[in-house]
Amino acid sequence: MNESLPVTRAVGHGTAKLMPDVDRERAWLLTVDGAPQSYVDLDEPAHLEFEYIRRLGHVLDTLAEPGHPLDALHLGGGALTLPRYLAATRPGSRQDVVEFDRELLDLVAEQLPLPKGADVTLHAADARAWLEAAPDASADVLVADVFGGSRVPAHLTSVAYAREAARVLRADGVYLGNLADAAPFAFLRSQLATLGTVFEELVLIAEPGVLRGRRFGNAVLAAAHRPLDIAALARRTAADAFPARVEHGAALRNFTGGARPVRDADAVPSPEPPDGAFGID
Protein backbone atom coordinates (compact mmCIF):
# COMPACT_ATOMS: atom_id res chain seq x y z
CA MET A 1 0.00 0.00 0.00
CA ASN A 2 1.04 3.63 -0.28
CA GLU A 3 2.64 4.12 3.10
CA SER A 4 2.14 7.89 3.14
CA LEU A 5 -1.65 7.86 2.94
CA PRO A 6 -4.22 7.19 5.65
CA VAL A 7 -6.66 4.34 5.11
CA THR A 8 -10.29 4.80 6.14
CA ARG A 9 -12.84 2.00 6.09
CA ALA A 10 -16.24 1.24 7.54
CA VAL A 11 -15.93 -1.80 9.79
CA GLY A 12 -18.51 -3.74 11.77
CA HIS A 13 -18.64 -1.30 14.67
CA GLY A 14 -17.79 2.13 13.34
CA THR A 15 -15.24 3.75 11.08
CA ALA A 16 -11.65 2.57 11.31
CA LYS A 17 -8.77 4.75 10.22
CA LEU A 18 -5.12 3.84 9.81
CA MET A 19 -2.83 6.86 9.98
CA PRO A 20 0.90 6.77 9.30
CA ASP A 21 3.28 8.13 11.93
CA VAL A 22 5.37 10.88 10.36
CA ASP A 23 8.26 10.10 12.72
CA ARG A 24 8.50 6.34 12.16
CA GLU A 25 8.61 5.02 8.62
CA ARG A 26 6.32 1.99 8.89
CA ALA A 27 4.36 2.82 12.03
CA TRP A 28 0.60 3.21 12.10
CA LEU A 29 -2.07 4.44 14.47
CA LEU A 30 -5.45 2.69 14.33
CA THR A 31 -8.48 4.64 15.45
CA VAL A 32 -12.12 3.56 15.53
CA ASP A 33 -14.64 6.41 15.46
CA GLY A 34 -11.81 8.78 16.36
CA ALA A 35 -10.67 6.93 19.49
CA PRO A 36 -7.08 5.63 19.43
CA GLN A 37 -7.20 1.85 19.43
CA SER A 38 -3.73 0.55 18.60
CA TYR A 39 -0.28 1.61 17.48
CA VAL A 40 1.98 -0.69 15.48
CA ASP A 41 5.51 -0.28 14.13
CA LEU A 42 5.90 -2.96 11.47
CA ASP A 43 9.70 -2.62 11.54
CA GLU A 44 9.95 -2.64 15.34
CA PRO A 45 7.16 -4.82 16.74
CA ALA A 46 8.73 -4.63 20.20
CA HIS A 47 8.07 -0.86 20.27
CA LEU A 48 5.01 -0.23 22.45
CA GLU A 49 3.78 3.34 22.06
CA PHE A 50 0.72 3.47 24.33
CA GLU A 51 1.52 3.59 28.03
CA TYR A 52 -1.07 1.01 29.08
CA ILE A 53 0.21 -1.37 26.40
CA ARG A 54 3.74 -0.88 27.75
CA ARG A 55 2.46 -1.91 31.17
CA LEU A 56 0.86 -5.03 29.75
CA GLY A 57 4.18 -5.67 28.02
CA HIS A 58 6.06 -5.33 31.31
CA VAL A 59 3.91 -8.05 32.84
CA LEU A 60 4.41 -10.29 29.81
CA ASP A 61 8.17 -9.76 30.11
CA THR A 62 8.18 -10.99 33.71
CA LEU A 63 6.04 -14.13 33.28
CA ALA A 64 8.88 -16.42 32.22
CA GLU A 65 12.57 -16.40 31.38
CA PRO A 66 13.44 -13.99 28.54
CA GLY A 67 12.72 -15.51 25.15
CA HIS A 68 10.74 -18.44 26.56
CA PRO A 69 7.66 -18.98 24.34
CA LEU A 70 4.17 -18.66 25.78
CA ASP A 71 0.75 -19.90 24.73
CA ALA A 72 -1.32 -16.73 24.73
CA LEU A 73 -5.00 -15.95 24.29
CA HIS A 74 -5.89 -12.36 23.41
CA LEU A 75 -9.49 -11.20 23.81
CA GLY A 76 -9.73 -8.08 21.66
CA GLY A 77 -7.66 -7.72 18.53
CA GLY A 78 -7.12 -4.13 17.50
CA ALA A 79 -4.03 -3.91 15.30
CA LEU A 80 -2.50 -6.98 17.01
CA THR A 81 0.12 -4.96 18.87
CA LEU A 82 0.74 -7.41 21.71
CA PRO A 83 0.61 -10.56 19.54
CA ARG A 84 3.33 -8.95 17.40
CA TYR A 85 5.27 -8.06 20.55
CA LEU A 86 5.16 -11.60 21.91
CA ALA A 87 6.10 -13.07 18.53
CA ALA A 88 9.16 -10.78 18.49
CA THR A 89 10.23 -11.11 22.13
CA ARG A 90 9.24 -14.75 22.66
CA PRO A 91 9.65 -16.53 19.30
CA GLY A 92 7.72 -19.77 19.05
CA SER A 93 4.79 -18.49 21.10
CA ARG A 94 1.42 -19.86 20.00
CA GLN A 95 -1.26 -17.22 20.05
CA ASP A 96 -5.01 -16.98 19.48
CA VAL A 97 -6.68 -13.60 18.96
CA VAL A 98 -10.45 -13.21 19.36
CA GLU A 99 -11.98 -10.07 17.87
CA PHE A 100 -15.72 -9.53 17.45
CA ASP A 101 -15.38 -7.18 14.47
CA ARG A 102 -14.51 -9.34 11.47
CA GLU A 103 -14.16 -6.34 9.17
CA LEU A 104 -11.62 -4.78 11.52
CA LEU A 105 -9.64 -8.03 11.59
CA ASP A 106 -9.70 -8.14 7.80
CA LEU A 107 -8.49 -4.53 7.55
CA VAL A 108 -5.58 -5.14 9.91
CA ALA A 109 -4.57 -8.43 8.28
CA GLU A 110 -4.64 -6.77 4.86
CA GLN A 111 -2.93 -3.46 5.62
CA LEU A 112 -0.68 -4.43 8.55
CA PRO A 113 0.26 -8.06 7.86
CA LEU A 114 1.74 -10.17 10.61
CA PRO A 115 5.43 -11.07 10.26
CA LYS A 116 6.30 -14.37 8.64
CA GLY A 117 6.66 -17.14 11.17
CA ALA A 118 4.35 -15.56 13.75
CA ASP A 119 2.09 -18.35 15.03
CA VAL A 120 -0.98 -16.15 15.49
CA THR A 121 -4.48 -17.46 14.69
CA LEU A 122 -7.26 -14.90 14.26
CA HIS A 123 -10.87 -15.65 15.25
CA ALA A 124 -13.86 -13.42 14.50
CA ALA A 125 -16.08 -14.22 17.49
CA ASP A 126 -17.57 -12.92 20.72
CA ALA A 127 -14.86 -13.04 23.39
CA ARG A 128 -16.88 -14.78 26.09
CA ALA A 129 -18.50 -17.27 23.74
CA TRP A 130 -15.10 -18.23 22.37
CA LEU A 131 -13.63 -18.44 25.87
CA GLU A 132 -16.42 -20.73 27.05
CA ALA A 133 -15.65 -23.13 24.21
CA ALA A 134 -11.86 -23.06 24.71
CA PRO A 135 -10.15 -26.13 26.22
CA ASP A 136 -9.13 -26.34 29.87
CA ALA A 137 -5.58 -25.34 30.84
CA SER A 138 -4.67 -24.29 27.31
CA ALA A 139 -3.06 -20.87 27.89
CA ASP A 140 -0.12 -19.45 29.84
CA VAL A 141 -1.53 -15.94 29.64
CA LEU A 142 -4.90 -14.41 28.79
CA VAL A 143 -4.93 -10.75 27.78
CA ALA A 144 -8.36 -9.07 27.86
CA ASP A 145 -8.44 -5.71 26.08
CA VAL A 146 -12.02 -5.64 24.84
CA PHE A 147 -13.97 -2.45 24.36
CA GLY A 148 -17.34 -2.09 22.70
CA GLY A 149 -16.88 1.47 21.55
CA SER A 150 -15.12 2.94 24.58
CA ARG A 151 -16.57 0.64 27.25
CA VAL A 152 -15.76 -2.87 28.48
CA PRO A 153 -18.81 -5.02 27.66
CA ALA A 154 -20.85 -6.12 30.69
CA HIS A 155 -20.60 -9.84 29.96
CA LEU A 156 -16.81 -9.64 30.39
CA THR A 157 -17.01 -8.31 33.95
CA SER A 158 -18.66 -11.06 36.01
CA VAL A 159 -17.58 -13.90 38.27
CA ALA A 160 -18.83 -16.41 35.69
CA TYR A 161 -16.53 -14.82 33.10
CA ALA A 162 -13.59 -14.82 35.55
CA ARG A 163 -14.14 -18.52 36.25
CA GLU A 164 -14.02 -19.28 32.54
CA ALA A 165 -10.76 -17.33 32.25
CA ALA A 166 -9.27 -19.27 35.17
CA ARG A 167 -10.39 -22.57 33.66
CA VAL A 168 -8.64 -21.84 30.36
CA LEU A 169 -5.43 -20.74 32.08
CA ARG A 170 -2.86 -23.25 33.28
CA ALA A 171 -2.14 -23.52 37.00
CA ASP A 172 0.67 -20.96 36.80
CA GLY A 173 -1.09 -18.87 34.13
CA VAL A 174 -1.76 -15.16 34.41
CA TYR A 175 -4.84 -13.10 33.54
CA LEU A 176 -4.23 -9.57 32.28
CA GLY A 177 -6.97 -7.00 31.80
CA ASN A 178 -7.05 -3.43 30.55
CA LEU A 179 -9.75 -1.45 32.32
CA ALA A 180 -10.66 2.23 32.47
CA ASP A 181 -12.28 4.16 35.31
CA ALA A 182 -12.13 7.27 37.48
CA ALA A 183 -12.78 8.09 41.13
CA PRO A 184 -14.62 6.78 43.09
CA PHE A 185 -13.62 3.67 41.09
CA ALA A 186 -16.85 1.72 41.52
CA PHE A 187 -16.15 -0.29 38.36
CA LEU A 188 -12.46 -0.91 39.00
CA ARG A 189 -13.08 -1.93 42.61
CA SER A 190 -15.86 -4.29 41.54
CA GLN A 191 -13.49 -5.91 39.05
CA LEU A 192 -10.85 -6.43 41.73
CA ALA A 193 -13.50 -8.03 43.95
CA THR A 194 -14.71 -10.19 41.06
CA LEU A 195 -11.28 -11.49 40.07
CA GLY A 196 -10.44 -11.93 43.74
CA THR A 197 -13.13 -14.60 44.02
CA VAL A 198 -11.16 -16.75 41.57
CA PHE A 199 -7.48 -15.75 41.83
CA GLU A 200 -5.36 -15.50 45.00
CA GLU A 201 -2.91 -12.91 43.66
CA LEU A 202 -3.98 -9.52 42.31
CA VAL A 203 -1.84 -6.65 41.04
CA LEU A 204 -3.00 -3.23 39.81
CA ILE A 205 -0.79 -0.97 37.66
CA ALA A 206 -1.85 2.62 36.97
CA GLU A 207 -0.55 6.16 36.90
CA PRO A 208 -0.55 7.92 40.28
CA GLY A 209 -2.79 10.67 38.90
CA VAL A 210 -5.45 8.14 38.01
CA LEU A 211 -5.20 6.36 41.35
CA ARG A 212 -5.46 9.68 43.20
CA GLY A 213 -8.70 10.40 41.39
CA ARG A 214 -7.40 13.32 39.35
CA ARG A 215 -8.48 11.98 35.98
CA PHE A 216 -10.08 9.15 34.04
CA GLY A 217 -7.57 6.61 32.77
CA ASN A 218 -6.45 3.07 32.11
CA ALA A 219 -5.56 0.54 34.77
CA VAL A 220 -3.88 -2.78 34.10
CA LEU A 221 -5.06 -5.62 36.33
CA ALA A 222 -3.07 -8.84 36.65
CA ALA A 223 -4.45 -11.92 38.41
CA ALA A 224 -2.90 -15.32 39.09
CA HIS A 225 -2.76 -18.26 41.46
CA ARG A 226 0.95 -17.58 42.01
CA PRO A 227 2.90 -14.53 43.17
CA LEU A 228 3.97 -12.16 40.42
CA ASP A 229 7.37 -10.46 40.31
CA ILE A 230 6.32 -7.22 41.99
CA ALA A 231 9.88 -5.88 42.29
CA ALA A 232 10.57 -6.33 38.57
CA LEU A 233 7.21 -4.77 37.64
CA ALA A 234 7.85 -1.80 39.93
CA ARG A 235 11.27 -1.20 38.37
CA ARG A 236 9.97 -1.39 34.82
CA THR A 237 6.90 0.77 35.34
CA ALA A 238 8.89 3.39 37.30
CA ALA A 239 11.32 3.75 34.39
CA ASP A 240 8.62 4.62 31.84
CA ALA A 241 8.14 8.13 30.49
CA PHE A 242 4.88 8.21 32.45
CA PRO A 243 5.70 6.19 35.58
CA ALA A 244 3.03 3.99 37.11
CA ARG A 245 2.43 2.59 40.57
CA VAL A 246 2.19 -1.13 41.25
CA GLU A 247 -0.38 -1.88 43.95
CA HIS A 248 -0.80 -5.29 45.58
CA GLY A 249 -1.35 -6.98 48.92
CA ALA A 250 -2.84 -5.00 51.80
CA ALA A 251 -2.82 -1.68 49.92
CA LEU A 252 -4.84 -3.20 47.09
CA ARG A 253 -7.26 -4.86 49.51
CA ASN A 254 -7.79 -1.45 51.13
CA PHE A 255 -8.39 0.08 47.71
CA THR A 256 -10.98 -2.60 46.88
CA GLY A 257 -12.71 -1.99 50.20
CA GLY A 258 -16.22 -3.40 50.47
CA ALA A 259 -16.79 -3.75 46.73
CA ARG A 260 -18.88 -6.77 45.84
CA PRO A 261 -18.18 -9.31 43.10
CA VAL A 262 -20.28 -8.88 39.96
CA ARG A 263 -22.87 -11.48 39.00
CA ASP A 264 -24.01 -11.88 35.39
CA ALA A 265 -27.45 -10.56 36.38
CA ASP A 266 -25.93 -7.36 37.80
CA ALA A 267 -23.15 -6.78 35.27
CA VAL A 268 -22.84 -3.38 33.61
CA PRO A 269 -20.32 -2.01 31.10
CA SER A 270 -17.38 0.07 32.28
CA PRO A 271 -18.15 3.79 32.61
CA GLU A 272 -18.35 6.05 29.60
CA PRO A 273 -15.14 8.07 29.33
CA PRO A 274 -15.55 11.83 29.64
CA ASP A 275 -15.29 13.78 26.39
CA GLY A 276 -11.72 13.98 25.24
CA ALA A 277 -10.39 11.31 27.60
CA PHE A 278 -9.04 9.14 24.80
CA GLY A 279 -9.81 11.10 21.65
CA ILE A 280 -7.35 12.68 19.26
CA ASP A 281 -7.54 15.73 17.08
Image: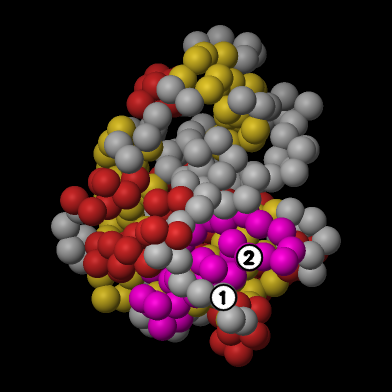
The reply to whether callout 1 and callout 2 are in contact (CB within 8 Å) is yes
**What residue is disc 2 on?**
186
For label 1, the crowd category at 10 Å Cα-Cα, with few meaning under 14, some 14 to 19 and many 20 or more, is some
In the rendered structure, find residue 126 and report the number of the disc placed on it: none
Identity of the residue drawn at 77% across and 38% down:
276
Q: Badge 2, how many Cα within 10 Å: few under 14, some, many 20+?
A: some
Give 29 or 281, whichever is nearer the viewer: 281
Q: Which residue is mark 1?
A: 259
Q: Secondary structure at mark 2?
A: helix
Please state which amino acid type lies under the numbered disc 1.
Ala
Whole-percent x, y for residue 82 in the image: 47, 47
Q: Visible in this render: residue 11?
A: yes
- Quadrant in the rendering for residue 275: top right
Up the image or down, 269 lies above or below 104; here it is: below
In this picture, which residue range is highlighted in magenta? 174-201
Q: Quadrant of the C terminus?
A: top right
